[in-house]
Image (cartoon, helix red, strand yellow):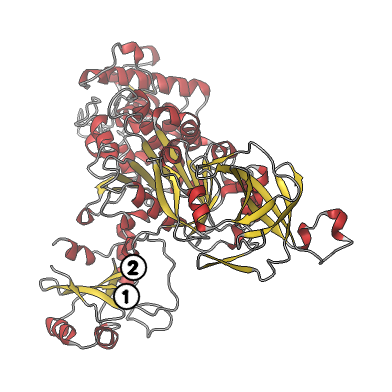
Amino acid sequence: MDWFETPESGSILRFRYETETLTLEIEFRNGNVYQYFDVPEPVYQAFCQAGSKGQFFSQSIRGAFRYARC
Amino acid sequence: MPSDPTYLGTVEDVRGATLSVVLSEETVSGLTFIDGSGYRIGQVGSFVRIPLGLVDLFGVVSQVGAGAVPERLAETEPFGRRWMTVQLVGEGRRFGKFQRGLSQYPTVSDPVHLVTEQDLEKIYGRPDEPQAIAIGQVASSESIPALVDLDKLITRHSAVVGTTGAGKSTTVAGLLSTLTDPQRFPSARVIILDMHGEYASALRDRATVFRVNPDPTRGEQQLNVPYWAMTSDELMPITFGALGDTERGAVLEEITKRKREALAYLDNPPITVDQVNADSPVPFSIHKLWFELHCLVNATHTAQQAAQRLETMAFEESPPSTPIQPGDAMTVVPPRFRSIQQGQVWLSQYPLRISRPLEGLASRLRDTRLDFLFRPGPWLPAVSGETSQDLDTLLAGWLGGAMPVTILDLSGVPSSIVNPLVGTVLRIIYEAMFWARYLSEGGRERPLLIVLEEAHAYLGQEAQGPAGAAVRRIAKEGRKYGIGAMLVSQRPSEIDTTILSQCGTMIAMRLANSSDRLHVAGAVSEHLQGLLDMLPILRTGEAIIVGEAVHLPVRALINPPASNRRPDSADPVVFQTVGPGGWNRSQEAQNYEDVVTVWRRQNPRSPRQAKMQDE
C-alpha cells in the first residue's frame, strides 16, 4: 500500500488506503497516525479528488467513521 | 580597553574560585554587538573570560546586581555600581584547548570579557576527541553542538531526571536514536526496561520489542523470563512466599536435587554436579516440585507412618482401582485422596508445614498472567526438567538481536512482581556480561547500555528486593564488565541514594520539586550550584548536563527525534487543531464495546487495526 503525500495540505501529511479492509490511514503533520475503518471506496475516491484534503476530512470523514490511533 | 566590545568590567574581589566583578561604566546598555551578533551582558549562566597573559580563565556568571555587591559596600553604594558574581571553572591556553581546573588566579583589576561564540566553541568543542558525540545544541548559542563523551556516558552510568512533561522520554528517545545511529554505531547495544510501553513507537525501526502480550502483527515477540533462571532469593517470594528457615532449607534442597538431575539434558553442563545449587541457571520443573510436595503433605496412605511410600498413596477410586482424579503436575491439578473418615488410611507424616505456601504456589502456577514466568514457551521444562531451548537462545534474543535496541515492555506485568522480575532480568543480563567478559559477546568488547525507565518504581529509598540489588550491582561494578545504566526518573529523591550517586553523568531537565532539586544538586560540585538554580525554569526539551561525560556543565537543547518518532507519552491535546479528537470537536460516536475488547485482550491496539498492518 503506497502512501500519497499531500504537500498542499496544512494538516495532513500523507494518507493511504486498503481496498480489502476499507481502511484509510492518515498521517497528520503533528506526527499522529490514525486509521479510519470501513471507509467506502467512493468516499476515499472523493477524498483523493478533494481540493482541500483537510476540509474534506473534517466534513466527511471526521465523526463519520470509527478510528483508532496507531 | 573600553573600546573592545567584549570588555565587561574588572575583577574586584577574589575568594577561592568565586570572583566579584564590577561592570564598567561603558557597558550600560546591557547589549553589545560583536562581529554582527548581539550578546546580552550579565546573563546568569553565561560564561566570561579573563585573559591572563597566554592563558584565558573562564568562569560562569552566578549572580548579577545588588545582591552581588560585596557586603562591606552594600551600605555605601546600594545601587551605585553594578556587580556580578562569577564562579571560575577552568582555563584555556590561547588558541589551545579548554580544560577544567585552574593553574593561577586572577587578581584585582584584571579585565573581564564577554565570551563570544568563538570562545564558546573552544570551551565546548572537542575536535581531537572522536568519542565525543553531539546530542543537541548549547542552549545559549544554538550554532554550537553540545558534545558528550560517549565512553563516559555509557560506562560511568547516567541519570535523566525531570518532572512529568519536561520532555524526559522524548529526550531519551532522541539520545538513543543518536547513540544507535546505524551509520556511526552499527554495533550499538541498548536494552530498555520500558514500564509503560512508550518507546516501541519511537524506536520502531531500530528496536525488537518483547511484551507479555505480544502483538505479532507489529513484529512483537513474547517476553519470557524462565523461573528456573532465577536465584532462590528471586524465586521464593513469588512462588512459596515467606517460609520458615527449616521449610525454606528443605525446599531449596529439593530444587537443588532436581536441578542436578536435569543436568543430563543440558548441552553445556557445568564441570561437576557439585557446582549446581539452588541458584544455578539450570532447568527444573516447578510443576513437578509442586505436585510431589503436594502429595507428600496432603496424601493419605494405605500404610502407617514408617511404611509410607509413594506407592501407598490412597487415591479416591471409583470404580475400584481407578483413581477419580490422579492429578497432573503440568496443568496444576491436585490429585484426590481418600479421606480418613472412610477408614483404612492414614495421614501423611511429612514433617514440613508448607501446605499454605503450596496452595499459594499452585494458584500462582495457574495464574495465566504469570505464564511468561512459569510457562515460558520453549524454555518450559517438562516434568523431567528437559527444555526444548536453553538460555543461549533467550540471551541471543535480548542481547544479540539484529536490531541495536531491545525493548522489554513490562507494561502488562502485574505490579506485585515487577520488582523481582526486573531484578531477574537485570541479573541474567549481568551474569551473561560478567562471565562473557573475555568473549566477543561480552560487555567489554561490545558494551551494553541498560535504560531503566521510571526507575523510582522499583528503586525506592534503601531499595529492597531483587531489583534494587541488581541495579546496585550494575551501578557499582557494571563499568568493569561493560554494562552502563541510564536511570530515567521524575522523582530523583525517591531513588536510592547509593544508586543515584553512582551515576557519573546527570541530565537534569526541568525540576520543580525542591527535594528533587536538592538531590540533583548534591551530585554537582559546590561552586556550580548556581547553574542548577535554573532547573525549575528550563524549557521543555532543555537539560543541564553535568558530570563526567562533559568538561563543563552545559545547558543544552537535546535533539528531539523526528516528529513521527516520538514516544507514546506525548501529552494528550485537549484543544486539538490537527486530526480528530480534542474537546473542541464535535463528539465522535462512542462504542465502549471496543474499550472492553482491548481491555480484556490486554492490548491497547484495536483488533481491527491489526488488519492493515498485515500488508
> Which percent across, then down, holds residue B9?
70, 58
Label of residue B558 in the image: none
Q: Quadrant of residue B437?
A: top left
* Cα separation between marks 2 and 1: 7 Å
How many C-alpha atoms fall within 10 Å of the one at disc 1: few (<14), some, or many (≥20)? Answer: few
Q: Is residue B156 visible?
A: yes
Amino acid type at circle 2 is Val
Task: Pick the residue in front: B450 or B508.
Answer: B508
Please indicate whether residue B239 sits to the left or right of residue B91 in the image. left
In the displayed structure, B93 sits above or below B275; it is: below
Please indicate whether residue B76 sits to the left or right of residue B460 in the image. right
Q: Quadrant of the N terminus of chain A?
A: bottom left
Amino acid type at circle 1 is Asn
Mark 2 near mark 1, Cβ–Cβ under 8 Å? yes
Please indicate whether residue B458 sits to the left or right of residue B604 in the image. right
Label of residue B591 in the image: 1
Q: What chain letter is assigned to the residue under label 1?
A: B
Task: Pick the residue in front: B374 or B294.
Answer: B374
- Mark 2 lies on residue: B595
Picture residue at 43% right of the left edge, 20% below the top = B250
Please indicate whether residue B397 sits to the left or right of residue B559 in the image. left
